[in-house]
Image (cartoon, helix red, strand yellow):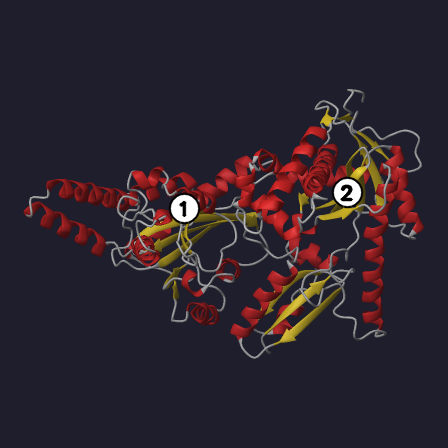
């Protein structure tokens, strides 16, 4: 009857589900019953699983922490994932910089940066920031603009209209600017009263001293503060910090909304829609809190967390949240008053969010399932192609040849498993490049599969935990085989891919090609293609996969070509090493500007003396006059006489 955490694995030893339990024995036993009694999703998980492992811990809090770390590490397919359908913007202040900057930020949070939000729209942040810059003229410009203003000794427009204190030109010192940024952060955190009272006091003092222009400016500043405060009305009169969660669910999906209340005002709002599992609502709430706060720093956890239903083990969850915050956290269901009213408002938002999602995505889940079923039937596959890998080759006239591999699982892109290949050798055609890419990818798969087999048989106890990288704790790069390989091209590319797999002894992975001209599906060994209807969901999925592989390949090719062209322009200049090349490109930004620079401009770069500057100018001048022309329509190089 001990608490613990368990993992279900599939035949490839991939973790497909992670769960925790107050008592492991009855929880695990509940999975091994008549499949008809299980939720369809749970039944699918149980039939997919090949083994189960468990770890006993001493307390429920330890189980909660271990479950979160495993979910983050293995990203199990059958665990409910509360993920935004978009990246929410934050108002961020980079306090870790010498001159802190206020800006709109998305994505992962960075160390040394203070965040406020999230907000529903970036324009709302910019509108609020524009109002507050009158009172808190903190820097908002990019590093490039800041350095340029410092070099020329003139501030940007915001400096001239008093919406920036212009530390770039020394109007304020670094310490004074940091004090402005910290006051701005205090105001955004909800400590607004002292700033309003200070402005009122200064305005009255200026008026009594007959400094009416100063009093008018302070009056306008006070109006800007009040207008910014009006944009976030007070919802909790006690000025508390709280996150308020609400759910709306049906048989298939659950919508979640959370309002972030700081200082009694709503500072941000977020929403998720996830697939509904067999879990009860208390279990959903527990997993939701785990995923929302698991990656947060202590200041991301508020003093109160208000939920519609308490999780199954509220004491353990409260203790875990308190350990993150560093002080007690009140986890409860509000019963009356303003907090209950706010919870109802959040619940209505969740219901409307679920309704909008159903309208927008009504055909999407069905279409993805239909596409996989169509491909299984059309290509005569044993199973639906839940994992599809697509490969493409990109080059210009055989130069800078690269390959791409993109992965779709359950009809959705899995970008963390995309891979890029640099083709070895010269004068490699498309089929030879495809053969090399497939051979390298599946050789790695065979090596990692053999290591996993040795571990299972006890032959190599030092080899590590199956297909999990011991250094990163994540699945190895090529640990899992696809159900279907798609190549961009026709019969030659398909045959090259099939021959690569046959040479490696792999006979359980299907291969097809999608030709661009007529969108024909080619199968190895067949003289005629498979023609799918234009309205086919299966064809649409193949097109998405193929187009994504092409985009990924051509992006990588352009990156390598750009680097090669830049390097070739500066190669061979006597006395110009890698460090000085980087310094020149960093200073001028491009080879084109470097060619247009005068010798005196070159000498201003650190490490470039008079003699070297003259040499660079002379060499780039020769390169410029001798540079070949390029036909913009075909991409072919044209010589000096104009012949192709």
Q: Nearer the viewer, residue 52 or 511?
A: 511
* Secondary element at image label 2: strand
What is the crowding at mark 2: few (fewer than 14 residues within 10 Å), some, or many (at least 20)? many
Residue for badge 1: 150
Q: Nearer the viewer, residue 401 or 438?
A: 401
* Secondary element at image label 1: helix
Q: Which residue is rendered at x = 66% and y = 44% of the image?
A: 412
Q: Is residue 554 above or below residue 301?
A: above
Count of numbered badges drawn on the protein: 2
What is the crowding at mark 1: few (fewer than 14 residues within 10 Å), some, or many (at least 20)? some
Q: Is residue 13 above or below residue 177?
A: below
Residue for badge 2: 402
Q: Position of residue 392 (x, y in %)?
A: 77, 39
Of the two numbered discs 1 and 2 on the same chain, state the one appearing first in sequence: 1
Task: Please identify the residue farthest to the front as the structure is shown.
Answer: 611
Between the residue at mark 1 and the residue at mark 2, the CA separation in whole angstroms equals 42 Å
Disc 1 and disc 2 in contact, CB within 8 angstroms: no
Q: Position of residue 376 (x, y in %)?
A: 80, 41
Viewport quadrant of the N terminus? bottom right
Q: Position of residue 120 (x, y in %)?
A: 42, 43
Q: Nearer the viewer, residue 466 or 497?
A: 497
Q: Which residue is rendered at x = 70% and y = 54% of the image?
A: 44
Left or right: where does residue 143 sit relative to residue 163? right
Q: Is any atom of residue 509 visible in this view? A: no
């Amino acid at each position: 009857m001990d608490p613990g955490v368990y993992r279900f694995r599939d035949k490839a030893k991939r973790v497909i589900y992670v769960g925790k339990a107050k008592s492991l024995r009855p929880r695990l036993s509940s999975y091994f019953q008549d499949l008809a009694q299980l939720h369809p999703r749970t039944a699918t998980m149980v039939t997919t699983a090949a083994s189960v492992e468990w770890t006993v811990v001493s307390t429920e809090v330890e189980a909660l922490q271990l479950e979160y770390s495993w979910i983050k590490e293995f990203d199990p397919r059958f665990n409910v994932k509360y993920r935004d359908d978009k990246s929410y913007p934050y108002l961020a202040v980079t306090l870790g910089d010498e001159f802190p900057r206020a800006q709109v930020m998305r994505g992962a949070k960075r160390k040394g940066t203070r965040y406020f939000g999230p907000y529903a729209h970036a324009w709302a942040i910019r509108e609020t920031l524009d109002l507050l810059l009158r009172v808190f003229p903190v820097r908002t410009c990019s590093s490039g603009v800041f350095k340029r203003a410092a070099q020329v000794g003139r501030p940007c427009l915001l400096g001239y209209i008093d919406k920036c204190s212009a530390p770039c030109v020394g109007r304020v010192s670094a310490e004074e600017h940091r004090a402005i940024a910290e006051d701005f952060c205090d105001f955004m955190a909800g400590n607004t009263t002292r700033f309003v009272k200070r402005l009122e006091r200064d305005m009255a003092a200026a008026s009594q001293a007959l400094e009416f222009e100063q009093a008018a400016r302070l009056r306008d500043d006070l109006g800007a503060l009040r207008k910014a405060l009006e944009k976030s009305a007070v919802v909790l009169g006690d000025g508390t910090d709280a996150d308020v969660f609400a759910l709306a669910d049906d048989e298939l999906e659950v919508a979640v909304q959370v309002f972030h209340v700081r200082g009694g005002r709503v500072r941000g709002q977020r929403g998720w829609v996830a697939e509904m599992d067999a879990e009860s609502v208390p279990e959903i709430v527990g997993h939701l809190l785990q995923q929302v706060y698991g990656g947060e720093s202590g200041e991301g956890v508020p003093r109160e967390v208000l939920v519609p239903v308490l999780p199954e083990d509220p004491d353990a969850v409260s203790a875990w949240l308190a350990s993150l915050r560093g002080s007690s956290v009140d986890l409860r269901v509000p019963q009356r008053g303003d907090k209950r009213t706010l919870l109802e408002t959040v619940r209505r938002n969740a219901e409307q969010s679920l309704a909008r999602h159903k309208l927008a995505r009504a055909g999407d889940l069905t279409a993805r399932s239909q596409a996989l079923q169509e491909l299984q039937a059309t290509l005569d596959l044993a199973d639906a192609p839940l994992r599809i890998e697509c490969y493409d080759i990109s080059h210009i006239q055989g130069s800078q040849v690269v390959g791409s591999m993109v992965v779709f699982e359950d009809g959705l892109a899995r970008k963390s498993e995309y891979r890029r290949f640099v083709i070895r050798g010269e004068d490699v055609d498309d089929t030879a490049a495809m053969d090399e890419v497939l051979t390298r990818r599946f050789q790695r798969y065979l090596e990692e599969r053999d290591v996993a087999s040795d571990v299972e048989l006890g032959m190599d106890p030092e080899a590590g935990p199956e297909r999990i990288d011991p250094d990163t704790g994540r699945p190895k790069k090529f640990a899992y085989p696809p159900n279907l390989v798609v190549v961009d091209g026709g019969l030659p590319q398909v045959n090259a891919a099939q021959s690569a797999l046959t040479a490696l002894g792999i006979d359980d992975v299907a291969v097809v090609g999608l030709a661009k001209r007529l969108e024909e599906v080619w199968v190895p060994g067949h003289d005629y293609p498979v023609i799918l209807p234009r309205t086919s969901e299966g064809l649409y999925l193949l097109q998405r996969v193929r187009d994504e592989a092409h985009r990924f390949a051509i992006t990588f090719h352009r990156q390598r070509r750009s680097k090669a062209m830049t390097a070739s322009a500066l190669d061979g200049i006597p006395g110009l090493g890698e460090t000085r090349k980087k310094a020149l490109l960093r200073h001028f930004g491009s080879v084109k500007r470097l060619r247009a620079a005068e010798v005196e401009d070159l000498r201003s770069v650190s490490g470039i003396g008079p003699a070297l500057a003259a040499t660079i100018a002379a060499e780039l001048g020769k390169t410029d006059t001798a540079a070949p022309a390029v036909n913009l329509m075909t991409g072919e190089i044209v010589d000096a006489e104009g012949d192709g």
